[in-house]
């Protein structure tokens, strides 16, 4: 008797469980508010993003495209994507420029009113060598390309040009402040070369107040006529500026930089095929390459982890996307943008239709929202549709604004209704950007996970509701 | 002729300047949008908050109320307030409890299935000593006060109780997660003592994943019957938990903690007297004391710097407040709340009318908004009035919500129309809270300055427009 009751209770319990499991699974995704709440909770409890980022930073390290480390990053992320049970994981392979730094640069003030002193420096990406004896010349300090242009060849010729403009402190969004300053790094050395300068120093484009130099691309003329160009630390730039106020300054510098033949490199791609509209693709992406300093933790380890973690979250939570959700880890963002260009070419060749492409390339900080751009005919109704989800996203501190998306997805613009940039808080990003200080320890794992949760929420809403007006 | 033209141009220029200066100065404050933009720019360019916080952290260091370091903090902040040209700077002096840690605590597992191993520990604030030989007993692990209560005296007696509840990862706002966990630290040891336990260990209430123990107040019964209570690091708690899964664990521990007679301590106050309604007071505050670990950088060096920096900003920008703006740096928030109680008593005694009191005590992170509470008759219209400024504050990522304010201003509730809590991003705060890791280097100075700008903006709007419905 007792046993029968127990069996009955057991059967009743089993039936209830069988009924409840699909009910629960279904109801989460039916109610958007509940879905977003579940996504955030699931990510904060179960995301492995901290472990993944740690491996990428500590075991792979920095990974300029074309380097052996980049290849290790391709292998590691492919394994991770394989392990989360996607419908397909594959690579796109193409040629990327290959530049190497060589020996560490050296810069020294050899004559000035304040004597001789060292300057902390780092060759800019794509730069050329000085030759093994280095070179010495008088310094000419300017604060903009326009200022150098006005000075003209007579004055610039034979000098070492020093671009000394700071990122403007008063601009709240540091990406805007960066945008107002970075031309001196990318185009400054080019103009200096054209005007006959021997070399070029650039005050690091950073919000930090230390002496860490921050590298990054500078223009390289394939036809020659390039000059050595180096970033210098903030404290060094301050000291140099001070010395120049007191009179002429003469400086010696050495740096190396070499291009060799292009190398094969790969984008890493993993996807969940859509159950209803497999031909409508939603991309979530970051770039796998980094500069050859630090560990590429925020730039853009965090973005790659976000992209992989979004797919992992959807899989773990048992969500069956209606559209194809594709994670793309681009190669060569830092010094050539070949990965983004190749992906767009391939997509065009296959006649793929992208509903949206999102890139996370602004670090692993607490999410503040998303920015949207596009010029396809469906852009306006799609942006309106996204805007209708404001009330769902606002409780998570997420705003939706027009604005830039990402360098790697930009070539997709003709083929993608929406291009989306993930916007985390910007205050700390340029403390570490392109410097030896961009390491795992500067990423707060809760903040990183919040990024995954925010992006997963938006991707879920786009997948579930589409981007058409009705 | 040429000279006359030059003189005329000079005169014209001078007259224009004389006309423009007051026009500009006036127009900034007349247009709220322009005013907030100017406040943010001015703070990001000119705030000295980084230097102030560095001094407080590195020269003064941690500063439990009643300690000589606290007195140094009083002197330093008084000097800073004196230096910014306020209408008055003064102190309020009163008695605070005085507790000292003594020798570092030691905890060691002496018998377990996984052998003997050390546990990283830190005595909780207000705790008592074990005696110099320490004590040893078997461990009893629970996850809540309720669980211990159910076990009862028979089981608890003679044991060392280990409260092992984690902060819930899935709660986005870490202050809410803290609120759900901290009872085991404050009330847990008290109950364990009542049930006859010999000592109490508490898993640190933290979001960090290191082994750093986090202290904080625990209940102290002035009539005796207290037991030694210690926080243990997260990694140590994990190891202990694992050992307990395999069988009985016996542990030896030593700790010291002493109360001596109450000491005199002070709140530090500085104010700008209102030009039109000097009797309507707006308080901006933080607490100057900290736990006796690290440097009290986020808790609550950042809040004190915010409070001083708001007044400095208004002075530097030449704003003449209509109401009295008062900076209050409270003593004894961490272990007695005597500073807040004394301030409220004095305010009541003098019949002072507080329009609003704001506290910054959630760290120096990027601002997300403000929370408001109150029960005075004017609260609802005042909160509505503040709500009418949402569109001005939203572009800075600031939201306005009902919610808690601050422990030091809470006693002012009967006398203050609004109590306001400053809300920075919460993700990182409990990584450092009450631990040796709460040091200057963990504060990003741009984020700290954004806090000043956000608080100054709200204080400006409250001062200019008041809090009445019309």
Image (cartoon, coloured by chain):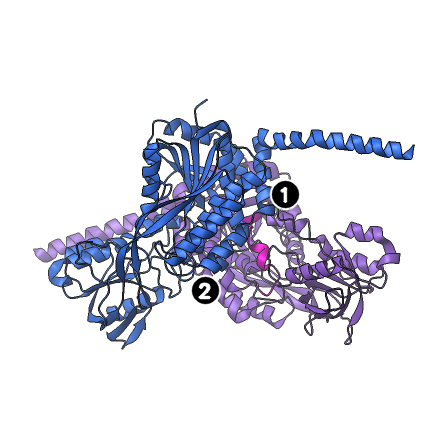
Chain colours: A purple, B blue
Q: On the picture, is A146 further left or further right than A398?
A: right
Q: Is residue A323 left or right of residue A243?
A: left
Per the rendered image, the range of residues in magenta is A421-437
Q: Position of residue B4 (x, y in %)?
A: 88, 32
What is the chain letter for disc 1? A
Asked if residue A401 is among those painted magenta in the image, a careful observer would answer no
Seen in the picture, residue B86 relative to A117 is either above or below; the reply is: above
Spot occupied by residue B276 in the image (x, y as percentages of width and height): 49, 26
Q: Which residue has dot 1 on it?
A: A374
A320 relative to A236 in the view: left or right: left
- State the SS at label 2: helix
Which mark lies nearer to you, 2 or 1?
Answer: 2
Residue at mark 2 to residue at mark 1: CA–CA distance: 35 Å
Q: Which residue is mark 2?
A: A51
Q: Is residue B362 left or right of residue B147?
A: right
Q: Nearer the viewer, residue A448 or A43?
A: A448
């Amino acid at each position: 008797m007792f046993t029968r009751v127990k069996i009955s209770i057991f059967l009743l319990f089993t039936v209830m469980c069988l009924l409840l499991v699909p009910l629960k699974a279904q109801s989460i995704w039916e109610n958007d508010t509940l879905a977003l709440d579940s996504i955030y909770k699931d990510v904060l409890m179960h995301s492995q993003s901290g472990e993944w980022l740690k491996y990428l930073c500590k075991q792979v390290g920095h990974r300029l495209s074309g380097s052996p480390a980049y290849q290790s990053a391709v292998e590691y992320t492919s394994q991770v994507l394989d392990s989360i049970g996607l419908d397909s994981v594959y690579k796109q392979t193409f040629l990327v420029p290959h530049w190497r730094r060589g020996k560490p640069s050296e810069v020294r003030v050899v004559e000035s009113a304040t004597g001789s002193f060292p300057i902390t420096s780092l060759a800019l990406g794509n730069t050329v060598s000085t030759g093994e004896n280095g070179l010495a010349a008088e310094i000419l300090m300017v604060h903009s390309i326009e200022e150098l242009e006005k000075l003209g060849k007579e004055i610039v010729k034979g000098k070492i040009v020093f671009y000394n403009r700071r990122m403007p402190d008063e601009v709240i969004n540091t990406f805007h402040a960066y945008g107002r300053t970075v031309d001196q790094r990318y185009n400054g050395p080019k103009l200096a070369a054209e005007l006959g300068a021997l070399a070029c120093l650039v005050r690091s484009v950073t919000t930090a107040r230390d002496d860490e130099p921050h590298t990054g691309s500078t223009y390289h003329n394939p036809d020659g006529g390039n000059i050595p160009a180096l970033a210098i630390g903030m404290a060094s730039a301050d000291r140099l500026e001070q010395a120049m106020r007191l009179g002429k300054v003469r400086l010696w510098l050495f740096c190396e930089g070499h291009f060799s033949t292009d190398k094969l490199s790969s984008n890493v791609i993993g996807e969940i095929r859509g159950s209803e509209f497999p031909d409508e693709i939603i991309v979530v992406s970051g770039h796998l390459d980094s500069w050859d300093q630090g560990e590429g933790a925020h730039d853009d380890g965090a973005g790659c982890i976000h992209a992989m973690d979004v797919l992992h979250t959807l899989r773990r939570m048992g969500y069956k996307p209606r559209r194809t959700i594709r994670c793309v880890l681009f190669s060569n963002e830092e010094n050539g943008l070949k990965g983004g260009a190749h992906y767009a070419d391939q997509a065009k060749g296959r006649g793929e239709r992208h509903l949206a492409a999102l890139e996370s390339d602004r670090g692993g900080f607490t999410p503040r929202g998303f920015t949207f751009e596009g010029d396809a005919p469906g852009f306006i109704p799609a942006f309106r549709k996204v805007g209708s989800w404001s009330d769902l996203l606002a409780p998570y501190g997420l705003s939706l604004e027009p604005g830039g998306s990402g360098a790697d997805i930009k070539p997709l613009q003709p083929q993608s209704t929406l291009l989306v940039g993930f916007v985390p808080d910007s205050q700390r990003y340029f403390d570490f950007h392109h410097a030896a200080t961009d390491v795992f320890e500067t990423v707060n794992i809760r903040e990183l996970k919040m990024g995954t949760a925010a992006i997963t929420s938006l991707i879920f809403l786009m997948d579930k509701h589409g981007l058409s007006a009705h």
